[in-house]
């Protein structure tokens, strides 16, 4: 567990805040009494004025809680204060309802109000729901339901989100037996007002009749519920915009642990779990520390959003980081340091989960005979492991034979994960708990131990499931201690919309992607990588480079160069020869080159392949770099990889292979064009051979080499339909929910300002272009596909939006409307983009192409940026030979191959400076 490396909140704690004055029950009731006396003849006026009074008290109490929190108070104190204010509000609202709004008979008993669920815990986030149980005796007095109804209307008028139920004790127990959710809410039931004896009866009967008899059932249900919830919220606890409440390692996980522990150990308060033997004092202190941090973040998140927001999105991360006192240090900006702390806390919650699971399993083996028989049916015979004397297979999981296994031989801390991977078995929670308690044994001596390093390298390069094994090591805290440079990136996020995971999680996923390529599981998506992987002679070096490629992020220097230095130090320790160590370092140093070239260069310009071949120099290096590049991109996050990127990388690979082979390739360019045409021909069985041959002649080789087969089929059908209808302008819209984009294909007569017109019409319709495929046919038609970021969740809504964009484009290209007359529609703004600051850059290079000057532009993306850039180039009397549009989250990186109107490169320094100046100005355009 990260006792040492979890930083404390950086803001100094101050004296506890004074008691709240927002909802003062006695004063409120006194004011309400005077108000009723004054307005007794006008019930409606009294109700309106009373609601306004309660709203003011509620707002005042919430403001006090916020000020106290921002002034150094704890998150727990804030949540407890808000809960106490809500208690008083309920008592006042109940009395107001019973006395004036739905008057009860003199002496009539009122409903007993019980807080349940999260509110029952006595902690409430600023805009959370409140869950109430109105507990009634077996024979409710007349009029009590009118009081409850009146009270609920008051709460709704106060804009409170209320979950409620009205039940007797028998009804509560009946419902709890049948419904696990109701059972869970009753675990933390808390008396607010009414008949306390009735409430205590409920507690006693619930404990004796349900809790005492159903612990195994409850534990199984809660753990299954947790798994389902985590899948919905995001299976990794290292998502860079985590859900503080529902995400893995969030508050709900802590709550689940507490519910299970209370249910099994029959305790009322969390601190009793130490006496019960579940937690050591140190572990319970960790529980409280995690709880406090998460509540502090959650309360601030609600206050900033002004609603019940649980997702820690980019736009709120920096304000919260600054409220908590984080600052920029050691290569990490304030928000990255805050989020690293968050992820370390989430990891600690995972450690606590392992502790509870281990304790529950140990307790189950000592239960009553009936419970033992239930467990016994699930257990398998314990057996020894032949070549690992300190370990055993216990109920189909790897466990230690004795608790001193790691003390006697610290190498066992690595061997445990090696055995689990080799055996394809999970690790017993008892062993996991012992690992977290033994992390101090991973010291310099163990890191230099040859056997420990051999075992680790075996795990990393395993043909079983290295991703699972590495993640287990990381979750347990072993990986960051055994490889200290990896420890520096554990929990490290990059403040960018492009990256979905923390650096450590990305590296582990990249190894998983590489393993998937090698196993042949990704052959359909990655045919080339799957084909060449078995041909790579330096497999171990490729796996190590994949594991280390981003390990030097957050150091304030070029992470590729710094990562290469890490590899040069680590390679010999892991037993690599100097030559193989240098091979790993080279891969890390160059790991971005192929991706940048594939997406930002003209791949059929000879200079592109020549430049890459000069870097890689050998076929082996080219194969290794392609495979690493693919694994890296796919591990960034869902939807980042697509068929277009795969096709670009394959084209770059084959073009470079030709150069490396002295003009020869396994499959030359003509062969690849022919193969693409034959694939398309098979997909169009209704076409005659002359029809297809004529169509094939309409495309240049670049089209056949770059466009993925599915899009080639769509293009063929669109162009065929246009020919049949003698149209020269057409559009087609498709949407892709997984990749979060909508594609608009445009076919129109080509002319120099066409791309500007398309981009402008798209921006005017509210579309933000994130990628583009731009081609010209031999008969003078432009065939352009632009990809705009998705705005709607439902495909039907998104398709309608895409069709509006396409209609705008058609009107613009027909001359029916001028771009200057178009107004952009109001649309939901991605507020996250406003939180990023990217310094724009423009480079002008005459060495990247034989025919063209290459202009590369990068900066903060925005709707209409491509329109403005292309319009600027056109206004400078420049022709755009090809454009390569890429976005990395909030960052746009666009490359344009340009020439002057005579077809010459731009050589004059003054003209190059003017191009830079004008393009930089576009980033300041509104």
Image (tube, rainbow, N blue to C red):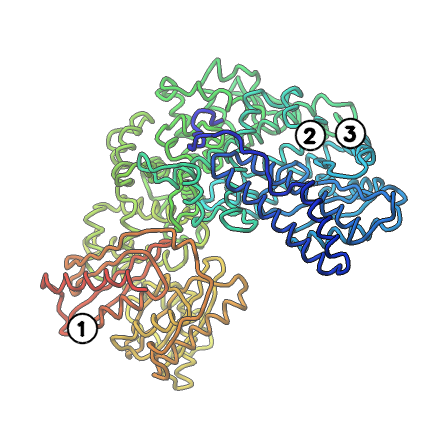
Label 2: state its secondary structure.
helix
Closer-to-camera residue (343/734): 343
Q: Determine the image quadrant of residue 411.
A: top left
- Quickly name the residue at label 2: 262
User: Of label 2 and label 3, which has the lower sequence position?
Assistant: 3
Measuring 45% from the left and 68% from the top, which residue is drawn there?
826
Q: CA distance from mark 1 to mark 2?
A: 75 Å
Label 1 element class: loop
Residue picked out by circle 1: 877
Provide residue 573's location: percent of width, then percent of height. 32, 25
Furthest-bottom residue in this view: 726
Indicate whether 681 appears above or below 296: below
Disc 3 marks which residue? 212
- Mark closest to the chain's N terminus, 1 or 2: 2
Marked residue nearer the N-terminal end (1 or 3) = 3
Circle 3 — which element? helix
Q: Residue at x 57, y 16 (%)?
A: 402
For the C terminus, the quadrant is bottom left
Examine the rendered structure and indicate whether residue 879 appears above or below residue 578.
below
Task: Report crowding for label 3: few under 14, some 14 to 19, many 20 or more residues within 10 A (C-alpha).
Answer: few
Q: CA distance from mark 1 to mark 3?
A: 83 Å
């Amino acid at each position: 567990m990260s006792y040492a490396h979890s930083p404390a909140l950086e803001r100094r704690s101050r004296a506890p805040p004074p008691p709240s004055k927002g909802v003062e029950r006695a004063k409120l009731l006194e004011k309400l009494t005077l108000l009723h006396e004054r307005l007794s003849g006008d019930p409606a006026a009294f109700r309106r004025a009373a609601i306004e009074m309660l709203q003011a008290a509620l707002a005042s109490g919430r403001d006090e809680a916020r000020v106290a929190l921002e002034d150094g108070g704890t998150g727990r104190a804030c949540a407890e204060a808000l809960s106490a204010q809500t208690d008083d509000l309920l008592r006042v609202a109940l009395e107001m309802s019973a006395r004036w709004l739905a008057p009860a008979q003199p002496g009539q008993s009122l409903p007993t109000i019980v807080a349940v669920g999260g509110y029952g815990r006595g902690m409430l986030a600023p805009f959370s729901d409140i869950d109430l149980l109105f507990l009634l005796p077996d024979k409710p007095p007349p009029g009590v339901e009118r009081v409850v109804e009146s009270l609920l209307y008051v709460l709704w008028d106060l804009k409170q989100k209320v979950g409620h139920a009205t039940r007797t004790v028998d009804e509560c127990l009946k419902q709890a037996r049948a419904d696990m959710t109701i059972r869970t809410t009753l675990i933390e039931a808390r008396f607010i007002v009414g008949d306390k004896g009735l409430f205590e009866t409920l507690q006693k009967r619930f404990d004796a009749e349900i809790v005492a008899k159903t612990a195994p059932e409850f534990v199984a249900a809660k753990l299954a519920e947790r798994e389902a919830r985590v899948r919905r919220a995001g299976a990794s606890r290292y998502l860079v915009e985590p859900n503080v409440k529902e995400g893995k390692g969030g508050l709900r996980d802590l709550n689940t642990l507490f519910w299970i522990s209370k249910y099994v150990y029959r305790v009322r308060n969390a601190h009793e779990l130490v006496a019960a033997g579940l937690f050591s004092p140190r572990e319970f202190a960790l529980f409280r520390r995690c709880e406090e941090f998460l509540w502090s973040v959650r309360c601030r998140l609600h206050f900033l959003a002004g609603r019940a927001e649980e997702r820690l999105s980019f736009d709120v991360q920096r304000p919260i980081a600054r409220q908590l006192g984080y600052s920029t240090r050691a290569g990490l900006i304030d928000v990255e340091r805050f989020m690293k702390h968050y992820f370390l806390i989430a990891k600690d919650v995972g450690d606590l989960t392992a502790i509870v699971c281990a304790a529950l399993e140990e307790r189950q083996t000592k239960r009553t005979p009936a419970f033992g028989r239930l467990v016994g049916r699930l257990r398998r015979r314990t057996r020894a492991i032949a070549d690992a004397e300190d370990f055993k297979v216990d109920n189909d999981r790897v466990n230690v034979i004795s608790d001193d296994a790691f003390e006697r031989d610290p190498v066992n801390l690595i061997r445990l994960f090696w055995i689990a991977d080799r055996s394809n078995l999970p690790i017993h929670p008892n062993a996991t708990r012992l690992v977290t308690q033994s992390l101090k044994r991973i010291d310099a001596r163990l890191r230099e131990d040859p056997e420990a390093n051999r075992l680790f390298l075996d795990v990393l390069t395993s043909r079983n499931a290295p991703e699972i094994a590495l993640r287990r090591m990381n979750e347990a805290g072993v990986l960051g201690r055994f490889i200290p440079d990896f420890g520096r990136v554990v929990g490290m996020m990059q403040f960018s919309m492009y990256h979905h995971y923390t650096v450590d999680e990305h590296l582990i996923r990249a190894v998983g992607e590489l393993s998937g390529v090698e196993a042949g599981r990704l052959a359909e998506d990655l045919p080339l990588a799957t084909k060449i992987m078995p041909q790579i002679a330096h497999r171990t070096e490729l796996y190590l480079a994949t594991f280390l490629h981003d390990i030097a992020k957050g150091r304030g220097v070029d992470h590729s160069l710094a990562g290469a230095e890490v590899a040069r130090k680590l390679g010999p320790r892991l037993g690599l020869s100097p030559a193989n160590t240098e091979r790993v370092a080279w891969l890390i140093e160059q790991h971005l080159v192929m991706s940048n070239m594939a997406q930002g260069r003209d791949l059929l310009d000879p200079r592109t392949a020549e430049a890459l071949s000069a870097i890689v120099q050998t076929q082996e290096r080219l194969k290794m770099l392609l495979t690493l590049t693919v694994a890296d991109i796919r591990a960034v996050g869902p939807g980042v990889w697509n068929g277009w990127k795969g096709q670009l990388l394959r084209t770059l690979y084959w073009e470079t292979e030709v150069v490396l082979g002295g003009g020869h390739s396994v499959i030359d360019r003509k062969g690849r064009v022919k193969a693409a045409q034959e694939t398309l021909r098979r997909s169009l069985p209704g076409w005659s051979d002359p029809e297809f041959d004529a169509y094939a002649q309409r495309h240049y080789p670049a089209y056949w080499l770059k466009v993925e087969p599915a899009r080639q089929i769509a293009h063929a059908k669109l162009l065929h339909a246009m020919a049949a209808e003698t149209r020269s302008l057409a559009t087609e819209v498709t949407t892709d929910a997984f990749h979060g984009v909508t594609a608009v294909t445009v076919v129109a007569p080509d002319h120099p300002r066409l791309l500007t017109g398309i981009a402008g019409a798209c921006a005017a319709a509210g579309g933000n272009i994130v990628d583009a495929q731009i081609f010209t046919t031999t008969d003078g038609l432009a065939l352009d596909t632009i990809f705009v970021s998705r705005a709607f969740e439902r495909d039907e809504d998104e398709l309608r939006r895409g069709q509006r964009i396409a209609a705008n484009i058609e009107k613009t290209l027909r001359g029916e409307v001028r771009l200057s007359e178009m107004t952009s529609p109001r649309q939901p703004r991605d507020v996250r983009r406003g939180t990023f600051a990217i310094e724009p850059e423009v480079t002008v290079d005459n060495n990247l192409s034989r025919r063209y000057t290459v202009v590369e532009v990068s900066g903060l993306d925005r709707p209409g940026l491509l329109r403005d850039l292309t319009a600027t180039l056109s206004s400078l009397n420049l022709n755009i030979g090809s454009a390569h549009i890429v976005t990395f989250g909030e960052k746009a990186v666009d490359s344009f191959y340009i020439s002057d109107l005579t077809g010459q490169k731009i050589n004059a320094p003054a003209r190059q400076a003017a191009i830079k100046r004008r393009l930089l100005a576009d980033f300041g355009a509104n």
